[in-house]
């Protein structure tokens, strides 16, 4: 399966550099100088492969230069192109906790006690951690932080994920937890 690593933005400066909208958690690895990436043009049609010549991060944004775009005019013509990787051709990752969105969407979500919670309908990237989006049978979308404490098991072979949610996260499942400090201060909790 081909996944988007980055989308090429506007040309930057005169020597063919472009700004990138990064779509990977490993830009240094996937976009390392010498990497050859498949591309799609703005309409989604396959386009010529690009070879990364330079990659840099200015603290806020990523920039790259490609061997096939030696000047600003050639770089500007790449605007909107998607840089792709073929996940099927990649070596197996030793990190068992790494998942692609397409591997998770469609899995049944079950509470650790076996109760059905719904279906995984999305994986949203987050700053601290990603969130699994579970759509309940009633159509409610619940965002579950994708951390081992709350999602202890992902089993694509069995077609499911196990969830150990805190009380109140899913409708009708457990009470909202209130710490002793909160109740000891004598405040109104009703």
Image (tube, rainbow, N blue to C red):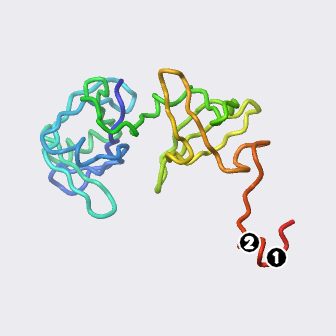
- Determine crowd level at label 2: few under 14, some 14-19, many 20+ residues with C-alpha closer than 10 A: few
Inter-mark Cα distance, 1 to 2: 8 Å
- Determine crowd level at label 1: few under 14, some 14-19, many 20+ residues with C-alpha closer than 10 A: few
Is 188 on the left-hand or right-hand side of 9? right
Q: Secondary structure at mark 2?
A: helix
Residue at position x 36%, y 31% from top? 3
Q: Nearer the viewer, residue 18 or 119?
A: 119
Q: Quadrant of the C terminus?
A: bottom right
Residue at position x 71%, y 73% from top? 181
Residue 55, compared with residue 30, is above or below; it is below
- Point out residue 111 in the picture as x, y percentages from the top left corner: 65, 36
Residue position marked by numbered label 2 in the rendering = 182
- Point out residue 120 in the picture as x, y percentages from the top left corner: 59, 32
Is 140 on the left-hand or right-hand side of 65? right
- Point out residue 93 in the picture as x, y percentages from the top left corner: 29, 34
Residue position marked by numbered label 1 in the rendering = 187
Residue at position x 54%, y 45% from top? 131
Q: Quadrant of residue 163?
A: top right
Residue 56, compared with residue 158, is above or below; it is below
Q: Secondary structure at mark 1?
A: loop
Is 28 on the left-hand or right-hand side of 144? left
Residue at position x 73%, y 50% from top? 168
Residue 75, compared with residue 108, is above or below; it is below
């Amino acid at each position: 399966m081909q996944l988007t690593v980055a989308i090429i933005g506007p040309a930057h400066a005169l020597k063919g550099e472009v700004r990138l909208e990064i779509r990977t958690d490993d830009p240094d690895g996937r976009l390392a100088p010498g990497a050859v990436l498949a591309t799609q043009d703005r309409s989604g049609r396959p386009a010529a492969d690009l070879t990364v010549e330079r990659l840099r991060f200015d603290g806020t944004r990523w920039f790259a230069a490609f061997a096939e775009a030696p000047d600003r005019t050639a770089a500007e013509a790449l605007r909107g192109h998607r840089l792709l990787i073929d996940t099927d051709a990649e070596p197996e990752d030793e990190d068992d906790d790494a998942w692609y969105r397409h591997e998770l969407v469609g899995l049944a979500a079950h509470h650790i006690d076996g109760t059905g919670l719904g279906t995984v309908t999305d994986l949203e990237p987050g700053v601290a951690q990603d969130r699994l989006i579970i759509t309940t049978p009633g159509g409610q979308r619940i965002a579950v932080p994708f951390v081992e404490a709350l999602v202890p098991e992902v089993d694509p072979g069995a077609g499911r994920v196990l969830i150990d949610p805190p009380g109140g996260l899913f409708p009708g499942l457990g009470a909202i937890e209130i710490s002793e400090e909160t109740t000891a201060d004598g405040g109104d909790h009703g």
